Image: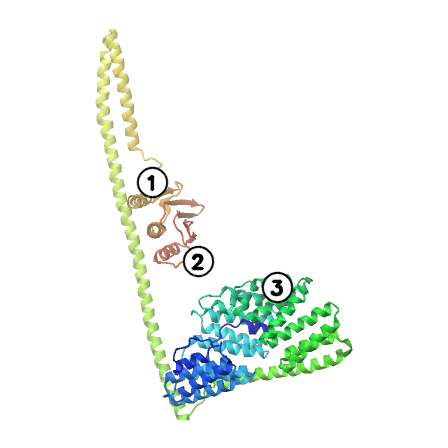
Amino acid sequence: MLLALFFFGCTQKKNFNTTINSSEDSLSSYLSLANDFNLPQEKRKQFNQKAFSIIIDQPNDSLNKVNLFKVANRYYNMDNWSDFKNTVDIILEKTNLTGDTISKTKAYTYLGDFYVSQAISDSAFMYYSKAEKMYLQSNDNYNLARIRLNKSILQFNEGDFLGSEIAVFNALRAVKGEKASDIVYDSYSYLGLIHNELGNYDRAIEYNSKALTSIDDKTLPSVFQSKATSLNNMGYIYQNMNRHDKAITYFREGLKQDNLKTDKPSLYAMLIDNIAFSKFKSGDSRGLPELFYQALQLRDSLQLTSGIIANKMHLSEYFAFKKDTVKSLQYAKEALNESVSSKNYRSVLAALKRLAIIEPKNASNYTKQYIDINDSLQTAERKMGDKFTRIEYETDEIKDENTDLVAQNRNLVFLFTALGVLGLFIFVIKTQKAKNRELLFKQQQQIANAEIYNLMISQQNTIETGRIEEKKRVARELHDGVLGRMFGVRMNLDGLNGFQDELAVNQRTNYLSELKNIEQDIREISHDLNREKSELINNFVAIIDGLFEEQKKTYKSKLISIVDSGIKWEVVSNSVKINLYRILQESLQNINKYAQANTIRIEFKKAEDHLILKMSDDGIGFNVKTAKKGIGLQNILFRTNECDGVVDIKSKKGEGTIITVTLPIE
């Protein structure tokens, strides 16, 4: 459990530039030399002490405290905990003299780090809580989130999984809406670890997947090996689920990451050990036990106590399976001894459990020790959880300094509350008046729209009436004038029938035949002009035809319009017609502005007791879910709602747009 937690952290703050200046007498040179990891540690310590002796005599200003923090950091990198704490204590004294809250907050964080290194969880938690409160007051959300994650780790290590999960979510809440991918990564990784420990494997997989997708190479440098860490955590979950083939896939993918052995040899060793264990569990003995030995050798060289214990437990289980009881017992006892000496009591429990299996004759003794330690561990965890809760309460508790000040504050609260209520009352009244004005305006706009439409219909009726009158006049002229005269000519020609010579007969016959043809043609023209054809479109259709003609003249897009001849426009109300006209206008305007369409198709159809307007284009389209509803779309929705209709918008990027408006008609 602790191994997985230890290896996915990637935000160590103690890394510094190791450039060495030419003059070793200057402060910057001492600080650089103190951070040169190529030098022996004793030498680095001497250079750090020289830098400290210069800084301690400088004026107590912000630069002085910055340099003291640098000295503390170098002691941290040397694992020189006593000098690290002494330096931080001096910084705290200086901040109390100057009231420097920023440096004080940072010093509390460093003291929390110190007590973590000493495994004194309650003191570490206390200083982290103090820093958390100050970061909260200064609105430093990033460092606030980082402190909460530090507290989460402490709670996790003490078995307070619920408290640890709450702390992680509080950290995520602090950086919500901000760019902090490293915080997000660590948070999801911690949540995955917590749920893995609780046996909620599906949730653990979900959170680790989120951690993987949140990795940002700019914020999380490759040297941290974040991806390899998450892949190892994912494989560890599947290992706990006994899905070892799946686990091996993740472990191998983790080992493929560039420079893993150089950047994070501890993680490299863990992956090898995990792959060996899953191979053994899945019945694949190839490369075993050599892989176990390879991981153990690397962990020995790095002095990774927790990793060494886990490795030896795996070797004990492996040799027990191979019926080599001697080696199995040897590694289990070594794991137990190292767990006891390092006070890793969870590992002590695991080792005792394994020994009880290997040595049945001593099983009762091992079981008794297991029960005693487990009970003590649970009691200690409960006490530590209670202590964490008490520390948080005491840190957040606001203590009153005098009764008079409290009374004054209470009176001020009452006064400001009364003023606030009065202001809210005035605001509500003004808001209501504004809403009433808006409603009145909408009503007036609807009346104006109806009047505009009626004017358009009236104008169209006038034009249509004039056109019909003109047709009738032309028909009368043709019928009464031209046909009358031509009839007279025909009668005169009939009078020539008395001439019986062959030439006269032929001419007369031709003239009469021609006159009859002309008479028939003119009669047909007269009837056509005087007849109202059933296909002739009524006034509303003429208006939208005018809109379509204007569109064709102005824009290069091809417009196709289809109007169902079965629609009885005379029974459609004027309010529906004006809204349909405005929806058409708005849609064409949106297409012209944004769609870049080559073809536009407009269809009016009747379906039972509904009128359907379908507008489609082959333009660039848009994402309906993420697109903001502009004024154009809002107007379409508003006008459709006014008619108790519905709008359906279908669009995808690169696939055009289809808007279907369905309105009920009587």
Q: Helix, strand, or loop for circle 3?
A: helix
Mark 3 / mark 2, whichever is N-terminal: 3
Residue 390, how many percent across, how many down? 53, 85
Please say whether residue 413 is visible from this viewpoint. no
* Contact, mark 2 vs mark 1 (Cβ under 8 Å): no
Residue of label 3: 247
Residue of label 2: 625
Q: Locate the N terminus and report the quarter of the image it occupies.
A: bottom right
| Disc 3 versus disc 2: nearer the observer | 3
Type of amino acid at the residue the image marks with label 3? Ala
Relative side of 596 to 486, left or right: right
Q: Quadrant of residue 194?
A: bottom right
Type of amino acid at the residue the image marks with label 1? Ile
- Work out whether 233 lies above or below 641: below
Between 196 and 662, the residue placed more toward the observer is 196
| Disc 3 versus disc 1: nearer the observer | 3
Relative side of 533 to 323, left or right: left
Type of amino acid at the residue the image marks with label 2? Lys
Relative side of 314 to 57, left or right: right
Q: Helix, strand, or loop for circle 2?
A: loop
Q: In which quarter of the image is residue 245?
A: bottom right
Please say whether residue 289 is visible from this viewpoint. yes
Residue 124, how many percent across, how many down? 52, 83
* Residue at x 39%, y 40% (from the top left corner): 565
- Work out whether 551 lies above or below 133: above
Determine which of the numbered discs, if any, sits on residue 537 in the image: 1
Residue 85, how many percent across, how many down? 49, 86
How far separated are the C-alphas under marks 2 and 1? Answer: 39 Å
Mark 3 / mark 1, whichever is N-terminal: 3
